Image (tube, rainbow, N blue to C red):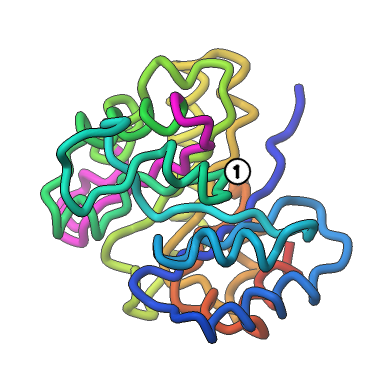
Amino acid sequence: MTAPTPLIAGNWKMNGLAASLDEAKAVAAGISRIAGRVALCPPATLVERMSRALAGSAVLVGGQDCSPEAAGAFTGDISAQMLADAGASLVIVGHSERRAGHGETDEIVAAKARAAVRGHLEPIVCVGETLDQRQAGDALKVVTGQVRESLPRELDRMAFAVAYEPVWAIGTGLTPTTPEIEEMHRAIRATLVELFGDDGAKVPILYGGSVKPSNAAEILHAAEVGGALVGGASLKAEDFLAIVNAL
């Protein structure tokens, strides 16, 4: 059975101006031979410029979100087709900051994943539990439920990734223990196989939640961890490359 190809994706969130493209170029210049793929997901204002700046390099460009709609009267939204037209090849959907701050449900996330596929983008679908849910002993139930409800059947035989991001670890400097990460990733893998059969074994499961150079190697070599969704550490080429090189 084919093992998943690892993916390290950097999520710049609401950070980055034109000068920040120098960091993206430094990432591209610093990548040597790695056993996986590397992507940067800048704010929408930089997607086209970053795509042009990194053309011909090993670094893919992605969006941070997309509308479930292809076009129309949706002021301020951006469609998967628009991101693809700007040079993106991937898009993050269902990030915990979208779920919590914008009220996105599993149903909305699934609709966005469908839209990504229609727009010829590879979705990175995020799932994860809050601290209260973990302390209540509900983490596995919550996350596997999100996997079932946030991944539409249209993803069958399509390229996509799942990113597990414990909400309580994002931006806090806290991380689950390696056994806790492995337990969750194994549960996600079992759910993917349940949903997509053998193809579910090929889906990379990324870990996201305060990934940094100091803990990257331990996390990336944990069982069923197929890469990382990196936040703040992706803003500086030196830090992001250290994580990429930990693969």
Amino acid tagged 1: Glu
Q: Quick one: which residue is furthest to the left in this view? A: 103
Residue identifier under label 1: 224
**Residue 169's spot in the image, x, y percent?**
34, 68
Q: Kindly identify the residue that appears in the image at 43 percent across and 36 percent down.
A: 81
Name the side, left or right, on which 168 lies relative to 208: left
**Residue 151's spot in the image, x, y percent?**
37, 27
Q: Kindly identify the residue that appears in the image at 64 percent across and 51 percent down.
A: 7
Observer-nearest residue: 105 or 121?
121
Whether residue 134 is in magenta: the answer is: yes
**Residue 202's spot in the image, x, y percent?**
64, 29
Quadrant holding the N terminus: top right
Whether residue 30 is in magenta: the answer is: no
Observer-nearest residue: 195 or 176?
195
Label 1: how many residues lie within 10 Å, few (<14), some (14-19) or many (20+)?
many
Which residues, given as a range, are shown in magenta?
A: 118-140
Q: Kindly identify the residue that appears in the image at 42 percent across and 33 percent down.
A: 116
